[in-house]
Image (cartoon, grey):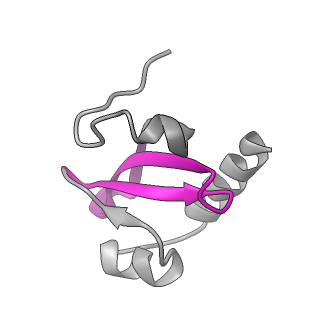
Amino acid sequence: MAKVALIEWYHELVISDFKNFNELKKVYGNVSLVSDDRVVFNIMGNKFRLVVRIVFEFKAIQIKWFGSHTEYDKINVATVQYKK
């Protein structure tokens, strides 16, 4: 279920053309700006959290972390890095 929701989120962002965080916030009302251009999305009604770095100027998205809401409470969202 989380995989499908994440893929849907990805496809929505690929076809979008957000110029800044305020435009993103208009569409994703629950998105939060945290630091270093990092934003947090709630996935599947807040069951999962997705931390990404967005550089609007280059339309670049880098996934930093994805996990459950419970796991999210245990990380430092400003410094967490994706690990394989």
If the image is split into quadrants, where does the N terminus sit? Answer: top right
Q: Position of residue 26 (x, y in %)?
A: 45, 84
Q: Position of residue 57 (x, y in %)?
A: 28, 63
Q: Quadrant of residue 72?
A: top left
* Residue at the image point whose x is 72% and y is 52% from the top: 5
Assess whether residue 60 is covered by the magenta stretch.
yes
Q: Position of residue 61 (x, y in %)?
A: 42, 48
Q: Is residue 43 visible?
A: yes
Find the residue positioned furthest to the bottom: 26
Find the residue positioned furthest to the top: 84
Q: Quadrant of residue 59?
A: bottom left
Task: Decide if residue 10 is on the left or right side of residue 24.
Answer: right
Magenta region = 36-62
Task: Decide if residue 8 is on the left or right side of residue 21.
Answer: right
* Residue at the image point whose x is 72% and y is 56% from the top: 8
Q: Position of residue 20 (x, y in %)?
A: 31, 73
Assess whether residue 47 is covered by the magenta stretch.
yes
Q: Is residue 20 visible?
A: no
Q: Main secondary structure of the magenta part?
A: strand
Q: Nearer the viewer, residue 74 or 62?
A: 74
